[in-house]
Image (tube, rainbow, N blue to C red):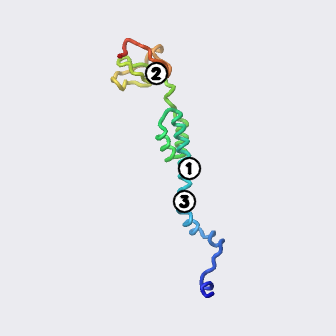
Amino acid sequence: MQAALTEPATSGAALVSDPTRRLRDNLPMAGGAYVLIALTFGIATGVIGRAKGSSFLLWFLIGGIVPLLGLIVVILYRGETREPERLCPNCGKDLKLYVQVCPRCGTDLYLPDPSEVRPPGAGRTPTSATRP
């Protein structure tokens, strides 16, 4: 009976109203909400990036590090799957129309005639400049 009289009486309401105790009790899960948000945005960003023809892992990391900004950027990101193509006149490598120097042979490329521009995914047209 003596011990009960010397201990301070604490009720459940007193524990909840103490802000330092509430913070101390939630400290182990303080970053849990951010981790959940980062994983969700990372997966969403990675899936959209992969659908546009880019790397899932790269977009997952971008979406996980900067969640909302990464998602906005991947939505605005332009995939290169629909770019018109042409052939290098020197080595015959398939190149996107905007490429100015052939990465294989180093030839300076200029704007081609409209007849040389192909839609993306079209088969190679044999020319005299291509090598086997």
CA gap between label 2 and label 1 equals 40 Å
Q: Is residue 34 above or below residue 131?
A: below
Local secondary structure at mark 1: helix
According to the picture, the residue beneath numbered tag 3 turns out to be 29
- Which amino acid type corresponds to the residue marked 3 in the rendered image? Met
Which residue occupies 63% across, 76% down? Answer: 10
Q: Quadrant of the N terminus?
A: bottom right
Using a 10 Å C-alpha cutoff, classify the residue at mark 1 as few (fewer than 14 neighbours), some (14 to 19) or many (20 or more): some
Dot label at residue 37: 1
Check contact, mark 2 vs mark 1: CB within 8 A.
Answer: no
- Which amino acid type corresponds to the residue marked 1 in the rendered image? Ile
Using a 10 Å C-alpha cutoff, classify the residue at mark 2 as few (fewer than 14 neighbours), some (14 to 19) or many (20 or more): some
Local secondary structure at mark 2: strand
Whichever of labels 2 and 1 marks the residue nearer the N terminus, that label is: 1
Residue at the limit of the structure toward the bottom, as seen here:
2
Q: Position of residue 26 (x, y in %)?
A: 56, 63
Q: Quadrant of the C terminus?
A: top left
Residue at the limit of the structure toward the front, as seen here:
1
Using a 10 Å C-alpha cutoff, classify the residue at mark 3 as few (fewer than 14 neighbours), some (14 to 19) or many (20 or more): few
Q: Position of residue 86 (x, y in %)?
A: 44, 19
